[in-house]
Image: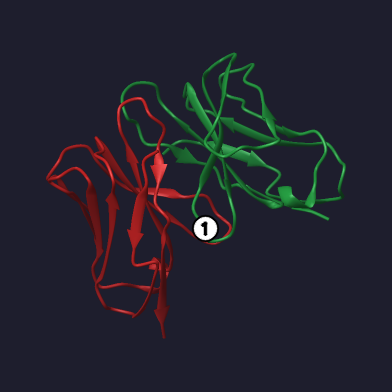
Chain colours: A red, B green
Amino acid sequence: GQQLNQSPQSMFIQEGEDVSMNCTSSSIFNTWLWYKQDPGEGPVLLIALYKAGELTSNGRLTAQFGITRKDSFLNISASIPSDVGIYFCAGHFGNEKLTFGTGTRLTIIP
Amino acid sequence: EADIYQTPRYLVIGTGKKITLECSQTMGHDKMYWYQQDPGMELHLIHYSYGVNSTEKGDLSSESTVSRIRTEHFPLTLESARPSHTSQYLCASSPTGGEQPQHFGDGTRLSIL
């Protein structure tokens, strides 16, 4: 089946820094999604991407659908304490089920 | 934002008990899903449904069963709980048509003693 590799696995940054994470696939996707999960909660949808090359922003978050359709990137600018959590990418192809990445754990150092 | 509710949020119970985890959504979504997730780890699909009376097993083998008698309700049942079932169970739903994003409930954290 399809696999999604997400990197980095974890990040330790200071408040105010910018964050970049990415997701790569062994095969193409038609849709890329980015979710954030806080401890003890379910994942919350941040950004959905539907077209290769698409660049979409949601406040301080920006995500891009890679032109090869095999990767996606998420950037967070000027991080704040509430950005702490685990970020998951997910991909869709046709009627197949959603495939999730392995997650990036973001920690902000005081 | 989809309204999807899971109960209970936390459950600690002894081995051998029958357990039902509830999931309900009020958005009229046809598609519903159950995922199993260990803390901080990736999500594994264990069951899904594309409509009433439709249920399928997911990628991760699970001893649980599901039913879909009503569009809004997708309960998951464990007939005889074991410590290996200890995990977080997340329910999600999405509209029919194309590659629509899934919206998640807050999960049930299950601990089997």
- Relative to residue A39, is residue A65 drawn left or right? left
Q: Residue at x 35, y 55 (%)?
A: A5
From the viewer's perspective, is residue B42 above or below residue A51? Answer: below
- Relative to residue B2, is residue B63 drawn left or right? right
Pointer 1 chain: B
Say whether residue A59 is visible: no
Secondary structure beneath disc 1?
loop
Q: Position of residue A44 (x, y in %)?
A: 43, 49
- Quadrant (top left/top right/bottom left/bottom right) for the C terminus of chain A: bottom left
Q: Position of residue A8 (x, y in %)?
A: 34, 67
Q: Residue at x 34, y 31 (%)?
A: B100
Give the amino acid type for the residue marked by disc 1 in the picture.
Met
Residue denoted by label 1: B41
- Quadrant (top left/top right/bottom left/bottom right) for the N terminus of chain A: top left
| Neighbours of disc 1 within 10 Å: few (<14), some (14-19), many (20+) | some
Q: Hey, which quadrant is residue B77 in on the image?
A: top right
Q: Position of residue B60 (x, y in %)?
A: 56, 39
From the viewer's perspective, is residue A97 above or below residue B109? Answer: above
From the viewer's perspective, is residue A6 above or below residue B7? Answer: below
Q: Position of residue A94 (x, y in %)?
A: 30, 27
- Relative to residue B38, is residue A2 drawn left or right? left
Query: Furthest-top residue in view?
Result: B53
Say whether residue B77 is visible: yes
